[in-house]
Amino acid sequence: MAKLQVIPGNKGKEKTYSLVYGLRLYPDGDLQRVERGKVTHQDGKESGVTLHLLEGTREQIRVQLLESIDAFFDIYGDDNVSITRSTHPQDQALPQRAAEGETGC
C-alpha cells in the first residue's frame, strides 16, 4: 500500500499552489448529476464527496496526488469490495459530509 506523508509548502523562490480534489467510486449507472462536491443519484437522493487539500510546488503536489490515488485504489480497487451508499436521513441532509457506508477516500 502506498505510504502517505505531509509535504510542507515551499517558502523559497519556487511558486507554490493549492490543489483541491475528491475521489469516490460509484456503481455504473448510479449517478444522475455531480456538482460542487454533491452527487445526485438516479433515485434522487444526494450524497457528498469529501474534498482533500494538497499544498506545495507543482512537483510536490503531483507526487502526493499520485500516491493518494494509488492508496485509494489499494483500499477500494479490489473487485471484492462492495460499493454502497448510505440511506441514513442525516447523510442526505448534509451532502458535504461523507456518508457512512459510502466508498470514498
Image: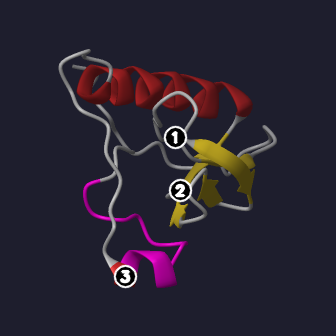
Residue in the foreground of this view, choosing between 66 and 82: 82
Query: Eyeballing the image, is 92 above or below 12?
Result: below
Judging by the rendered image, the residue that carries numbered circle 1 is: 23
Q: Circle 2 sits in a helix, a strand or a loop, which is it? A: loop
Amino acid at the residue labelled 1: Leu
Residue 62, horizontal then vertical, whole percent: 62, 25
Estimate the spatial distance between the alpha carbons at disc 1 and disc 2, rounded to whole Å: 7 Å
Please give left or right for residue 53 compared with residue 3 in the image: right
Task: Classify 10 Å Cα crowding around label 2: few (below 14), some (14-19), many (20 and above).
Answer: many
* Residue drawn at point x = 36 percent, y = 65 percent: 99
Q: Is residue 50 visible?
A: yes
Q: Is residue 94 magenta?
A: yes
Residue in the foreground of this view, choosing between 92 and 22: 92
Please give left or right for residue 14 compared with residue 43 in the image: right
Please give left or right for residue 95 compared with residue 83 in the image: right
Q: Earlier in the sequence, mark 1 or mark 2?
A: 1
* Residue drawn at point x = 27 percent, y = 63 percent: 100
Q: Circle 3 sits in a helix, a strand or a loop, which is it? A: helix
Judging by the rendered image, the residue that carries numbered circle 2 is: 49
* Residue drawn at point x = 75 percent, y = 45 percent: 16
Image quarter (top left, top right, bottom left or bottom right) of the C terminus: top left
Marking on residue 89 = 3
Residue 12, horizontal then vertical, whole percent: 71, 45
Dominant SS of magenta comes to loop
Amino acid at the residue labelled 3: Pro
Q: What are the residue bounds of the magenta stretch?
A: 91-101
Residue in the foreground of this view, choosing between 88 and 11: 88
* Discs 1, 2 touching: Cβ within 8 Å: yes
* Discs 3, 2 touching: Cβ within 8 Å: no
Please give left or right for residue 97 compared with residue 55 in the image: left
Q: Earlier in the sequence, mark 3 or mark 1?
A: 1
